Image (tube, rainbow, N blue to C red):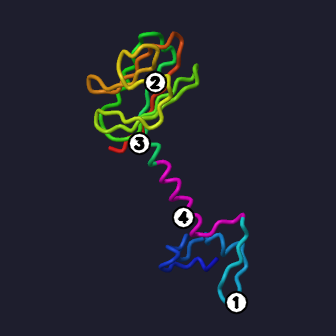
Amino acid sequence: MGTVAADTTQGSDLFTGDQSFYAHDDQADSKTTAGVYSHNELQASANEAEAMCDWARHINGILSGFISAADTDFDTDDVLSTGIGAGYGILMVAESVDAVASAWLVQDESLLAMMVHGSFSGTKDTASKYNVYYETDQFKVQNKVGNNKSVVVRMLSMS
């Protein structure tokens, strides 16, 4: 663990100037005569704090790309219009009563199977399946399995 001061390998100071706050290492860790901090594993340095913030920003960015649709009373021959249009990303469909799920790569209006459970089909009107397909400017899920199902659709959009 090096000093908290900015340099090309460590980024920038957590606090600067004459603020009443100091970088955590300055408050709690001891510093050797060579200017190196001892580091308690339960404490975060300025660089570690910045790395944690980067991860939080990354996760928030991913979550903001999710688009969702759901139907908790999904009966035979019902069609869920998801409102999810053409684009690029990953479309995930899960049905919780039968505990099945599938994922497709979306390219414009096309579905490319990534991990498709045997209860799903990518074609409209396939008997005894949850059918996922694109029609009239959006992806749809059709129930050809049975009554009282609960389906959730999520798309991680990359466009």
Which badge, 4 or 3, comes first in the chain's sequence?
4
Measure the alpha-carbon separation of dots 2 and 4.
43 Å
Q: Which residue is mark 2?
A: 120
Which badge, 1 or 2, comes first in the chain's sequence?
1
Q: Give the camera-side residue of 108 and 124.
A: 124
Q: Is residue 44 magenta?
A: yes
Label 2: few (<14), some (14–19) or many (≥20) C-alpha neighbours in 10 Å: many
Q: Which mark is residue 118?
A: none
Q: Give the camera-side residue of 99 and 40.
A: 99
Q: Which residue is mark 4?
A: 50
The secondary element bearing badge 4 is classed as: helix
Q: Which residue is mark 1?
A: 33
Which badge, 3 or 2, comes first in the chain's sequence?
3
Which badge, 4 or 1, comes first in the chain's sequence?
1
Q: Is residue 4 above or below residue 61?
A: below
Q: In the image, what residue occupies the spot 50% across and 59% down?
A: 54
Percent position of residue 115, x then y: 48, 35
Q: In the image, what residue occupies the spot 72% across and 66% down?
A: 41
Q: Give the camera-side residue of 149 and 51.
A: 149
Q: Are marks 3 and 1 in contact (CB under 8 Å)?
A: no
Q: Is residue 60 above or below residue 115?
A: below
Residue kind at label 4, given as amino acid type? Glu
Residue mark closest to the camera, 3 vs 2? 2
Give the residue furthest to the bottom: 33
Q: Are marks 3 and 2 in contact (CB under 8 Å)?
A: no
Residue kind at label 3, given as amino acid type? Gly
Give the side of residue 49 with respect to residue 38, left or right: left
